[in-house]
Image (cartoon, helix red, strand yellow):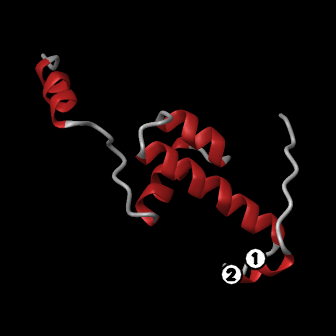
Amino acid sequence: MRTVPIQLPETVFSALRKNPEEFVQEMRIAAAVKWYELGEVSQGKAAEIAGLTRAEFINALSRYRVDFMQYTTEELAEEMGNVD
């Protein structure tokens, strides 16, 4: 695993009422959720970015009010057509 240092003003931690470690974890989750929502990463990759299991990531999606299924109408129709 690679460590990437970032600098944040001391005042930002109080915004979410979290200590620095909790704040950084929440940043990882928020970024992963958004990237998943935009279709930039898969659900599995987003869970990895967030440092969560896939089940935990699905729960995070719910907390952020993001649908866990990111299918377009066409993709869903295609998937349903492949069901025997």
Asked where in the image residue 81 lies, by quadrant, the reply is top left
Q: Please, what is the three-letter code of the amino acid marked with disc 2?
A: Ala
SS for callout 1: helix
- Residue depicted at 66% across the width and 59% down the height: 27
How much space separates mark 1 and mark 2, taking CA atoms?
A: 5 Å
Q: Which residue is mark 1?
A: 12
The image shows residue 75 at horizontal and vertical percentages of 22, 28
Residue 73 in the figure: left or right of residue 13: left
Q: Are marks 1 and 2 in contact (CB under 8 Å)?
A: yes
Q: Dot 2: within a 10 Å radius of its alpha carbon, few (fewer than 14), some, or many (20 or more) residues?
A: few
Q: Please, what is the three-letter code of the amino acid marked with disc 1?
A: Val
The image shows residue 6 at horizontal and vertical percentages of 84, 55
Q: Quadrant of the N terminus?
A: top right
The image shows residue 16 at horizontal and vertical percentages of 66, 78
Residue 28 in the figure: left or right of residue 82: right
In this view, 11 is above or below 31: below
Q: Which mark is residue 15?
A: 2
Asked where in the image residue 39 lies, by quadrant, the reply is top left
Would residue 55 be seen by someone viewing this image from the given angle?
no
Q: Nearer the viewer, residue 57 or 18?
A: 18
Residue 63 in the figure: left or right of residue 8: left
Asked where in the image residue 63 lies, by quadrant, the reply is bottom left
Q: Quadrant of the C terminus?
A: top left
